[in-house]
Image (cartoon, helix red, strand yellow):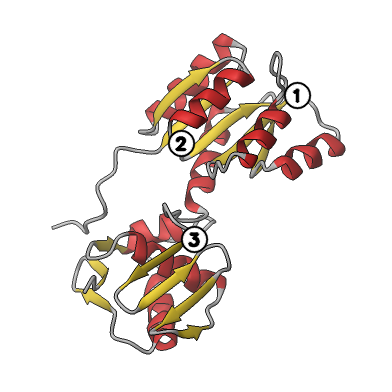
Amino acid sequence: MSAAAPASTGARVLVVEDDALLAGLVADGLQAEGHRVDVCGDGEQALDHLADLDYDAVVLDLNLPGLDGIEVCRLARQSGCTSRILMLTTRTDVADRVDGLDAGADDYLAKPFSLQELAARVRALLRRSVTAVADQVTVGTITLDLASHRAHVSGREVLLTNRSFALLAAFLAHPGEVLARTWLLDHVWDHAVDYRSNLVDVEVRRLRARLGVDAIETVRGLGYRLRSG
């Protein structure tokens, strides 16, 4: 029996690109990765999409008609958008890249690019963190404040490394579910890893020791589960 992971139909991705041919190619490539993709061609439409739906990631062209990508990114962040944003541009000037990142972009990809690299960049962005609907998540006696990056157990603050914090966030986002080691490697580690490694087991042991409570159980042959009660 294979290790279980949370059911998924892929991420929801918005592609904002005024070149219809390129937009179609990018959408096809991301759909081949299993993602659900919407496409629009200008900044106003992009902001409407972002107001209506929660996207996991946005592939955003910088050189859009009307509102450019930097302004779209800035306005989206001001409205509370937490989607991962990958900005596409033909510009190579460092100042332009800095402007995009300062506006709230998570990553930058210069044109021309390969679809394989774009797909890899999107995967990396989706792995960076497990997001939650609220800034504060509580399961049992454990509370995680995603905004202040603090964890508490029964009111006692627990100091965690960035990796342990991300791992705990993954468990709290899926209480009571068995999370396979491979799923945790894909969603908690922000770089390529060897699936045969024991990174997850080592990090779980560290997290258990820090928490000081018996909250994370081992499900033999499958992975780990956070007790929801």
Q: Is residue 90 above or below residue 93?
A: above
Identify the residue at horizontal 43%, vertical 21% (top origin). Answer: 28
Q: Quadrant of residue 178?
A: bottom left
In front of the other: 80 or 56: 80
Q: Which residue is mark 3?
A: 189
**Residue 191 image-quadrant placement:** bottom right
Looking at the picture, how far across and down is residue 109, in whole percent? 67, 34
First of labels 1, 2 by sequence position: 2
Which residue does the numbered mark 2 point to in the structure image?
A: 55
What percent of the width, then of the height, locates residue 91?
A: 80, 27
Judged by depth in the image, the label closer to the viewer, 1 or 2, is 2
Of the residues under marks 3 and 1, which one precedes in the sequence? 1
Local SS, label 3: loop
Locate residue 207, reporting x and y percent.
42, 80
User: Which SS class for mark 1?
Assistant: loop
Q: Residue furthest left?
A: 1
- Judging depth in this view, the residue of 97 and 78 nearest the camera is 78
For marks 1 and 2, give the CA distance. 24 Å
Disc 2 is placed on an element classified as loop
- The amino acid marked with disc number 3 is Trp
Instruction: Specify the amino acid type for callout 1.
Output: Thr
Q: Where in the figure is residue 117, as x and y percent of width and height?
A: 57, 35
